[in-house]
Image: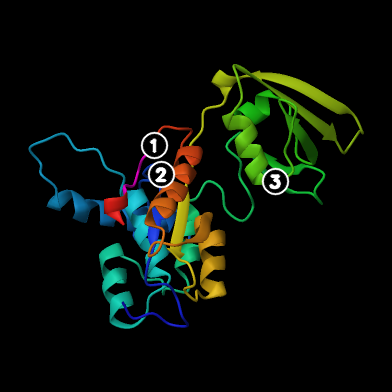
C-alpha cells in the first residue's frame, strides 16, 4: 500500500456497529449520505455471498474498518478503495463522512441517551437529552453536571461507559443542576438502558512512525482508539492486549477475537 506522510501500513481495525439505512443518493458528507454509501457497499457484498444460507453480517462494520484504512491511503490504492466503498470523499475527508455512523463522536454522545462533554474535570456537562431515553427518565436536563453513576465518578467518556456497563439492576445517577444549584440523585432501572454502541480501534506496530494527523482523524471521525503493540517480537502479548480491549468494549461478549496464528 502506498502511504503518505509515514501513515501506517499495518492496520487492525475492530468494529461493532449496526446498519444505518436509507437516504437519497448524493455526495457522502453527513449521516444521511453515509447511509447511502453503506447501502451501496452492502448490496455489493451481499451479491458476493452464498444466498443458499441464512446470512448475518454488518456492512457498517466492514465499511467503517475499511474507512479507517482508507484514511491512510493515497494514489491508486485510494482510488480503488473509494470505488469499492462508493465514496466521493478523499482520504483526508473520510473521517468527516464516517462521523455520521458513530453514536459517540467529538461531542461525546454517551450510551445513556444524553449528549455530554467533559467540564473541567468536575463531571460530564449534559448538552442534549434524548426524549424517552434512560437519561430522560432519570430527570437529566441540558446544563446538568453528572458527577457519578452508582457512586463511580464520570468525569470522562471512558468513566461514563465503564460505570454504565458495570451497573447492576438499578443505576443511581447523581447530578448537579447548574440552573438552580440543586443536587439530584435518581435511580433508573437497568432495563431503561438500551443502547447501541460502537468499538473501533486501530493497532499498529510498535516503533512505526504514524502521522499524528491521521491518528487524530481516527479519534474524531471514527471515535477510534489507537495504540501500538509489538506484533513482531511479542505476538502473544499483542494478541492479549487486543483481546482484552475487545472484551471490555463488548461487555465480555467477545473475549477471544484473535489468536496468535491470526496476526
Q: Which residue is pictured at 13% across the width and 52% down the height?
A: 48
Q: In this figure, which residue is indicated by the disc labeled 3?
A: 156
Considering only order in the chain, which callout, 1 or 3, is on the residue closer to the N terminus?
A: 3
Q: Can residue 136 be seen in the rendering of this structure?
A: yes
Give the side of residue 225 with respect to residue 146, left or right. Answer: left
How are the residues colored? rainbow
Which quarter of the rendering shows the N terminus? bottom left
Image location (x, y in percent) of residue 27: 39, 66
13, above or below 204, in the image: above
Where disc 3 sits, the SS reads loop
66, above or below 112, in the image: below
C-beta proximity under 8 Å, tags 2 and 1: yes
227, above or below 146, in the image: below
Q: Nearer the viewer, mark 2 or mark 1?
A: 1
Distance in Å between CA atoms under marks 2 and 3: 21 Å
Distance in Å between CA atoms under marks 3 and 1: 24 Å
- Which numbered disc covers residue 94? none
Nearest the eye: 136 or 110 = 110
Q: Which residues are magenta?
A: 254-259
Q: In this figure, which residue is indicated by the disc labeled 2?
A: 16
Image location (x, y in percent) of residue 149: 71, 29
Q: In this figure, which residue is indicated by the disc labeled 1?
A: 254
Q: Is residue 162 magenta?
A: no
Amino acid at each position: 500500500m502506498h502511504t503518505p506522510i509515514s501513515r501506517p501500513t499495518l492496520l487492525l481495525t475492530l468494529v461493532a456497529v449496526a446498519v444505518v439505512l436509507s437516504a437519497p443518493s448524493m455526495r457522502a458528507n453527513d449521516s444521511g449520505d453515509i447511509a447511502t454509501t453503506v447501502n451501496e457497499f452492502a448490496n455489493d457484498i451481499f451479491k458476493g455471498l452464498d444466498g443458499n444460507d441464512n446470512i448475518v453480517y454488518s456492512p457498517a462494520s466492514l465499511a467503517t474498518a475499511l474507512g479507517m484504512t482508507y484514511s491512510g491511503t493515497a494514489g491508486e490504492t485510494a482510488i480503488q478503495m473509494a470505488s469499492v466503498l462508493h465514496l466521493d470523499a478523499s482520504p483526508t475527508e473520510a473521517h468527516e463522512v464516517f462521523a455520521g455512523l458513530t453514536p459517540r463522536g467529538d461531542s461525546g454522545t454517551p450510551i445513556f441517551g444524553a449528549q455530554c462533554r467533559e467540564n473541567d474535570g468536575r463531571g460530564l456537562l449534559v448538552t442534549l437529552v434524548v426524549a424517552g431515553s434512560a437519561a430522560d427518565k432519570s430527570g437529566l436536563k441540558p446544563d446538568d453536571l453528572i458527577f457519578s453513576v452508582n457512586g463511580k465518578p464520570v468525569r470522562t467518556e471512558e468513566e461514563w461507559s465503564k460505570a454504565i456497563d458495570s451497573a447492576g439492576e438499578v443505576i443511581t445517577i447523581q447530578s448537579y443542576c447548574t440552573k438552580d444549584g440543586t443536587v439530584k440523585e435518581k435511580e433508573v432501572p437497568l432495563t431503561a438502558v438500551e443502547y447501541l454502541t460502537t468499538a473501533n480501534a486501530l493497532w499498529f506496530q510498535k516503533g512505526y512512525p504514524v502521522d499524528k494527523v491521521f491518528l487524530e482523524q481516527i479519534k474524531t471521525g471514527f471515535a477510534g482508539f489507537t495504540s501500538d503493540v509489538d506484533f513482531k517480537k511479542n505476538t502473544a502479548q499483542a494478541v492479549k492486549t487486543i483481546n482484552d480491549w475487545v472484551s471490555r468494549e463488548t461487555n465480555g461478549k467477545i473475549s477471544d477475537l484473535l489468536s496468535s496464528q491470526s496476526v
